Amino acid sequence: MSMEQLVATGVLIGLLGIAVVSDIRRHRIPNLLILVGLALGLAGQIYSGGISGLGDGLLGILICFALFLPMYAVGGMAAGDVKLMAMVGSFLPVHYALWAALYSLVFGGLCGLLVVLIHGQMLQTLGRYWLILKARSYLAPSADEVAGKPFPYAVAILLGTLGSIYWQLVASGLGD
């Protein structure tokens, strides 16, 4: 991993750390954080790859945004989560941005499952999903169901991004 990539990775992880703290405390991810992150991510891509790097950064944004937008559209996550994932895409090479988004979706599912298990609502949640399948229509969680409460998805995005970065390091021989 080059020095530019190392710096960009450190900046990205720092921005995600701030987003996680904000999401846990206020259930919000500041737009200013996203805008600064997008600018820094694209600037880093331009610095390391010129106009081609800009194209990679924009494509990473588009891929991450496109993968998360449907989850927002069905009410499965907030707009800040979609924007945060797009910010991640501005920093990473295209294929690692795709993996970061996919890993983030997997970690989001695992975190959601863990929350449901901890609150002892697995049967209630599975029952609602069974009804959704039967009715072929979305059924919102009841007021007492933990699945309907805000979830700090920035945690899953951080974990998914770290997973992608880890595989990027493994593929490059851990910094060779």
Image (cartoon, rainbow, N blue to C red):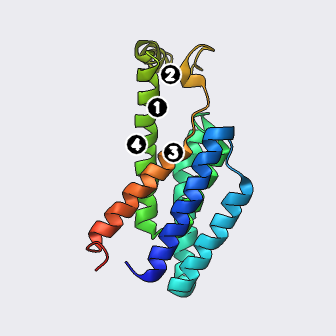
Vertical comparison of 38 with 76: above or below = below
Return the x and y of residue 48 as percentages of the image width and height: 51, 84
Real-space Cα separation, disc 2 to disc 3, in angstroms: 30 Å
Residue under the point 32% across and 62% down? 167
Real-space Cα separation, disc 3 to disc 4, in angstroms: 12 Å
Q: Are marks 4 and 1 in contact (CB under 8 Å)?
A: no
Real-space Cα separation, disc 2 to disc 4, in angstroms: 23 Å
Q: Nearer the viewer, mark 4 or mark 1?
A: 1
Q: Nearer the viewer, mark 2 or mark 4?
A: 4
- The tag earlier along the polypeptide, 3 or 4, is 4
- The tag earlier along the polypeptide, 2 or 3, is 2
The residue under label 2 is: 136
- Label 3's element? helix
Q: Nearer the viewer, mark 2 or mark 1?
A: 1
- Label 4's element? helix
- The tag earlier along the polypeptide, 2 or 4, is 4
Residue closer to the observer: 16 or 126: 16
- The tag earlier along the polypeptide, 2 or 1, is 1
- Label 1's element? helix
In the displayed structure, does residue 125 sit left or right of residue 74? left
Q: Amino acid at mark 2?
A: Arg
Q: Say which mark, if any, is on residue 112.
A: 1
In the displayed structure, does residue 147 sit left or right of residue 80? left
Q: Amino acid at mark 4?
A: Val
Which quadrant, please, contains the C terminus? bottom left
Q: Amino acid at mark 1?
A: Gly
The residue under label 4 is: 106
